[in-house]
Amino acid sequence: MKRSGKITFIVVALLVFVFAYLSFFGVSNYYGDTEKIYVKGAADIRWGIDIQGGVEAIFTPDVTEEEFDTITSEDMANAETIINTRLVNKNITDSEVYTDNENKQIIVRFPWQSEETDYDPAEAVRELGETAMVSFYAGSEKTGTPLLQGAADVESAAPGYNEQQGYVIQLQLTDAGKSKFAAATKTYLNSNISIWLDDEMLSDAKVNEVIENGQAIISGQDMTLEYVEEVSEKINAGALPFALKVDDTIRVINPTMGERSLQVMLLAGIIAFALIAILMIIKYRVPGVIAAIAVLGQIAGIIACTSGFFAGADSFTLTIPGIAGIILSIGMGVDSNVITAERIKEELRYNKKTLDGAIDAGFSSAFSAILDGNVTNVIIAIILMGIFGPYSSIWAKILWPFMWVYNHTVGLIPGLAIANTITGSIYSFGYTLLIGVIFNFIFGVAASRLMLKGVSRFKALRNPVLYGGVKND
């Protein structure tokens, strides 16, 4: 039993240190001048405009003068919503999108991509302004009336892969699109049907059978994973009601916190963690050492969820308020370990329990206080992410009744309409606070308990004084 406990401590502590190293530094390799990233680290975090700077572009409808006068405020609002969706699909949550209905302009601000030193903002702006209308035409030319077109016929798109065709784009049609596609494939059996995204041909395939299941596949020999993901995102975001052009020169936005703010914050974070660890060890001895390891694991978990460390997760846009969320959640992690250490000390000094009994009782009595504080913050984080986050997120859907009230109140209460200017920052705060609380439970509660019970099996570390108790007689 004692040997098993010792091994548990060694294994858990080692896993925490390995996880921390990987989340901070990642894993990559160079082939010549090309870097191949296997595991993303802190360097892959996408920083917000306030930390890293970004670009600003002003869009106007790319239409004729006669069409320009017919554009309504509702059309502009729809265009703004789709641009916001495209930004979110690229995992850019720290963006600012404003609509000037009088001049029919949409002002967009978004941060640089941290992983690209040669990031081309002009290309990113061009992608935001594309109409992205998907259409099906009979034959290999974009002529005549489209067989299917837009969101009314195409419900969603997703990247896929099969051995025969490689990377493909899988289209799911609406009920109306399903009927139209079945009729079209029947009419043009043994002929070609082409699929277009704006003026770009995505596919030109011969119809070999009638397709009635409401699914279509876009394939091509030169399609890469990045390409099918990009096209799928554009289709899912929806088509703009009109094409947009950049009205003015793209403007570079300098970071509001200064160019060296990131290095200063990093240094301050390292110093703060070192001081906290030293104070915890001096005050609580062995539980303090365990607390320092647990907090390190919590920080690593937050960095991992922000950098895109986990497979299938992209880098999250981290802002100054997001860093505040990290600091707050780390403070809660330290507090959790302090509460537990104090409970263990009380059990040893006043209830005269054995070391093993004190550790079990200490964690048990501390858990309810830790749970109450953390659950409260989870609720706050979810509310912030739901109200100030993307409308398509699960939190926004849960909080839809509140969102309805909010949307109908904007304009009635003075000052409430400015909320859109802080959306990305507040969402970043809620996100880091939420994941910080989650990792507090994982490391500050579960891992801490395993490590403390394991380290207490070492004979040299079984003196109650090392846990806040009195010296053995």
Image (cartoon, rainbow, N blue to C red):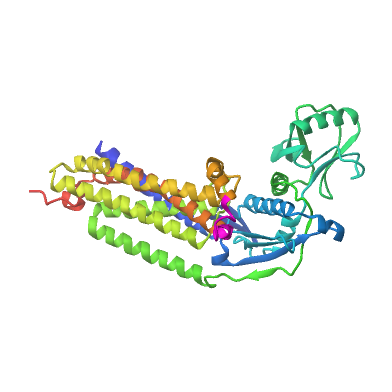
- Does 130 appear in magenta? no
Establish if 169 lies above or below 62.
above
- Picture coordinates of residue 388 (x, y %)? 54, 52
- One can see residue 208 in this view: no
Can you name the residue that lies furthest to the left here?
Answer: 473
The residue shown at (52%, 54%) is 427
Q: Kindly indicate the quadrant of the structure image that contains residue 416.
A: bottom right
- Picture coordinates of residue 463 (x, y %)? 17, 49
Left or right: residue 114 compared with residue 276: right
- Picture coordinates of residue 17 (x, y %)? 40, 52
Residue placed most toward the observer, 271 or 175: 175
Q: Kindly indicate the quadrant of the structure image that contains residue 268.
A: bottom left
Left or right: residue 401 compared with residue 251: left
Left or right: residue 106 compared with residue 464: right
Q: Quadrant of the N terminus?
A: top left
Per the rendered image, the range of residues in magenta is: 409-422
Establish if 229 lies above or below 245.
above
- One can see residue 241 in this view: yes
